[in-house]
Image (cartoon, coloured by chain):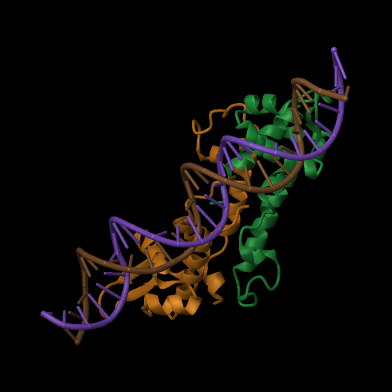
Chain colours: A green, B orange, C brown, D purple
Amino acid sequence: MMELTRKGEYAIRGIVYLAAQPDDKVCLLSDIAAAVDVPATFLAKIFQQFSKIGLVKSYRGTGGGFLLGRLPENITLLEVVEAVEGPIIPNRCVVGAGECTRDLSCTVHPVWKRVQEQVRNVLEGVTLKDLAGE
Amino acid sequence: MMELTRKGEYAIRGIVYLAAQPDDKVCLLSDIAAAVDVPATFLAKIFQQFSKIGLVKSYRGTGGGFLLGRLPENITLLEVVEAVEGPIIPNRCVVGAGECTRDLSCTVHPVWKRVQEQVRNVLEGVTLKDLAGE
DNA sequence: CCCTAACAAGACATTTTTTATCCTTTTAGG
DNA sequence: CCTAAAAGGATAAAAAATGTCTTGTTAGGG
């Protein structure tokens, strides 16, 4: 339970690799994929998602590639994970009122809410700088 | 991400229902299923898992059915969830040494470990008595 | 202006997991 | 024995995860 998918793992590996590169080095997708051992086509999809929300910047054409959208210390693990896995929702109930028909009587509800908060807290407290190790 | 499956939801609903019953009332699976709005055949599988590890007791034949294996205050939500969803493992790495080849270099590892602990803590702090409301 | 390098985007295919259902077997009571 | 009820195994349908392929777009360099 609560397992990160491959996609999530790949996403983290890929962006942590970027974070570990010299500041404005532009990296080829193919190089990143090879370095972190992820299928290049799959990683492409992941980085496209990152690109859309500005987690990474991308350049096309000759000399193109990827680099981090912000400073590593300003990108949290939470952002990375939620970017590819969607919001952290341990239970459908947590989403919001109305989604859970047994809303009022549902005593489990607040428990999942707490789980959600705890997890988010941990992930929010870790930046790519931490993960890249300086 | 981190979403409980239907099975998990059903499991909780089912066993919380049991916990809310008078102490040694034996409940029919069909009644429980109807009450908590879960397919009876599916709930049967879930309760079989519960039964194997003693979370519930079952009796066959006429007058048979299910009741809680222990007092509601002695069964934690963690047990219930792990019984049907397996151990709480946010990331394959956390399982143990050797499972993750990039073990040593994996800076993400300890983060997931912390997530795991936080989640387990929350779920362990809630009992079926809490959930059944008295 | 064209050719090539590189990412973007969408459609498609495969595999695994989830979500069931059904049938047969076992156990127990009456 | 006959019926009630759970146990267990096999199977099936649907959804999600995982990956691939093809085509489009953008940019640089001769």
Residue under the point 72% across and 34% down = A15
Does residue B76 appear anywhere in the picture? no
Give the number of marks: 0
Q: Quadrant of residue A101?
A: bottom right
Foreground pick, A25 / A105: A25
Foreground pick, A4 / B93: A4
Q: Position of residue C1 (x, y in %)?
A: 88, 25
| Vertical position of residue A57 compared to residue C11: above or below | above
Left or right of C29? Residue A2 is right
Residue under the point 68% across and 40% down = A45
Residue under the point 62% across and 58% down = A90
| Vertical position of residue A93 compared to residue B35: above or below | above
Residue under the point 60% across and 72% down = A107
Left or right of A113? Residue B64 is left
Foreground pick, A41 / B121: A41
Q: Position of residue A105 (x, y in %)?
A: 61, 77
Quarter of the image that includes the C terminus of chain B: bottom right
Q: Position of residue B87 (x, y in %)?
A: 49, 50
Left or right of A46? Residue A5 is left
Left or right of A16? Residue B46 is left
Does residue A121 appear anywhere in the picture? yes
